[in-house]
Amino acid sequence: MCLALCLLLPFLTGQIPQIGGMLSPMHIPVLLAGFLCGPWWAALIGLIGPVLRYLMFGMPPFPVFIPMCFELAAYGLTAGLLYRFLPKKTIHIYTSLLGAMVAGRIVWGTAMSIMMAIMGNPFTWKAFFAGAVTGAVPGIILHIILIPILVITLKKANIIKE
């Protein structure tokens, strides 16, 4: 289900890269997968989601989807690991989410640096900050509001077990 959402949610942004880049709709199901499915399944969903979406719909474009695969895998893995090992209190949903968001952005920056170096282009701190923070603020806010609400609701519905 999370992988299907990874493929379908970006259609809500109308496949407009600027809006999709700001709201990061593929991040939502991967982060949820960390809470629902555990770290390893979530990492796998994050790793293959962008590749499948590129192969099926041509978005995210090449080569953008390559570092995104690593970023989303880090999101799912980190959210799942933190949620698994931290006490099951509401505050730790936020801790797991924020930890995953930081780890994913670090991994994205590292992957971008490597990819850009291979292509012969520098990846500066300014470019990292613009891509990981400034341009992502709407998505960061959306995720901080939406993911905990969904996780808490799913816990109350006994879909997520303690």
Image: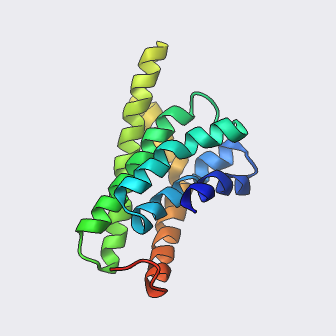
Residue 84 spot, x, y in % from top left: 28, 67
Question: As displayed, is residue 114 above or below residue 131?
Answer: above
Residue drawn at x 50%, y 40% is 68
Residue 151 spot, x, y in % from top left: 46, 75
Question: As displayed, is residue 133 above or below residue 82?
Answer: above
Q: Residue 101, can we see it? A: no
Residue 45 spot, x, y in % from top left: 49, 51
Side of 158 where 10 appears, left or right: right
Side of 85 where 3 appears, left or right: right
Q: Residue 154, can we see it? A: yes
**Quarter of the image where one finds residue 124:** top left
Q: Quadrant of the N terminus?
A: bottom right
Viewer-proximal residue among 98 and 154: 154
**Quarter of the image where one finds residue 90:** bottom left
- What's the coloring here? rainbow
Question: As displayed, is residue 60 above or below residue 90?
Answer: above
